[in-house]
Structures are given as C-alpha cells and as structure tokens.
C-alpha cells in the first residue's frame, strides 16, 4: 500500500504542477479564472488518470473508468470552487485547498472504486 501511495503522490505532484502552470499561463493571457481553472483541470486530470492507470494501479485505462474519474474529480472541483466563491476566498487559496482535498479523495476513490482489483471467479 505504501508503494502505491508513493506512486500516486508522485503523479499528484506532477498533476498539481500541470494544473497550476496551465492555470497561470491562461490567466496571464487574459482568460477568466473560471475558464482557466476548467481547462487546467481538464488537462491535469487527463494526465493523472492515464499515469495512475498505467504506473500506479497497473490497470487498463478504459472509457468508463476515465469518465468515472473525471466526473468524480470534477464534482470535487466544482464543490470546492462553489464554497470558495461563497466565502470569497482568494484563487490561490482555492487551488491549495482543492489540491489537498482532491489528493486524498482522489487516492481513495481511485484505489477502491476506479482501479480496484477484480477478484477472479
């Protein structure tokens, strides 16, 4: 379990960097934060899914698994963004909170739902 978590954490660091860099580039080029964050999320979550499927969980990257993963992580992102908007939290704080929460929730969801090992009958 520690080895799987370490691999997931490594991909998580790369995923976070991809998200934050994409977000920063888009905002710097005049895009609104909402669009920038959505695009950055899409790029980062796609990388994360395929990297974790292959390297962390040694699982097949299927369309249904991709949709399950993206939908779940998207819901987490929208919920955190919605709370941040209501509380008027700074965008940087929102990125930090989302990164932390999605890391923990994403690992649990990936390990026990999306990429769980099927028992042979």
Image (cartoon, rainbow, N blue to C red):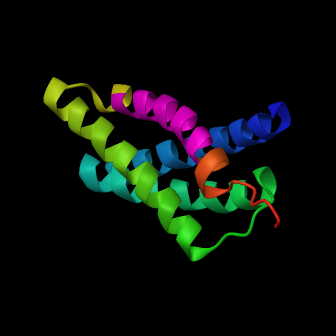
* Count of numbered circles in the view: 0
Q: Position of residue 52 (x, y in %)?
A: 70, 54
Residue 61 appears in the rendering: yes
Q: Quadrant of residue 94?
A: top left
Q: Is residue 43 magenta?
A: no
Which residue is pictured at 53% across the width and 55% down the height? 45
Q: Is residue 18 left or right of residue 77?
A: right
The residue positioned farthest toward the bottom in the image shown:
63
Q: Is residue 106 magenta?
A: yes
Characterize the magenta stretch by its predominant secondary structure.
Answer: helix
The answer to which of 85 and 109 lies nearer the viewer is 109
The answer to which of 39 and 119 lies nearer the viewer is 119
Location of the N terminus by quadrant is top right
Which residue is pictured at 47% across the width and 59% down the height? 70
Say above or below: 103 vs 60.
above
Location of the C terminus by quadrant is bottom right
Residue 29 appears in the rendering: no
Q: Is residue 115 left or right of residue 70?
A: right
Q: Position of residue 11 (x, y in %)?
A: 69, 45
Query: Which range of residues does the magenta coloring cover?
Result: 94-109
Q: Position of residue 31 (x, y in %)?
A: 27, 55
Q: Is residue 84 left or right of residue 73?
A: left
The answer to which of 110 and 52 lies nearer the viewer is 110
The residue positioned farthest toward the front in the image shown:
121
Q: Is residue 70 left or right of residue 89?
A: right
Say above or below: 69 vs 61.
above
Which residue is pictured at 78% across the width and 41% down the height? 7
Which residue is pictured at 22% across the width and 39% down the height? 82
Q: Position of residue 78 (x, y in %)?
A: 30, 46
């Amino acid at each position: 379990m520690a080895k799987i978590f370490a691999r997931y954490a490594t991909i998580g660091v790369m995923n976070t960097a991809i998200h934050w860099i994409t977000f920063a580039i888009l905002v710097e080029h005049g895009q609104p934060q909402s669009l920038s964050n959505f695009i950055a999320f899409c790029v980062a979550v796609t990388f994360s899914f395929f990297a974790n499927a292959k390297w962390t969980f040694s699982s097949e990257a299927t369309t249904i698994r991709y949709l399950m993963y993206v939908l779940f992580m998207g819901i987490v992102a929208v919920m955190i963004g919605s709370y941040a908007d209501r509380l008027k939290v700074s965008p940087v704080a929102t990125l930090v909170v989302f990164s932390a929460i999605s890391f923990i929730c994403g690992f649990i969801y990936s390990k026990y739902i999306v990429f769980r090992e099927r028992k042979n009958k």
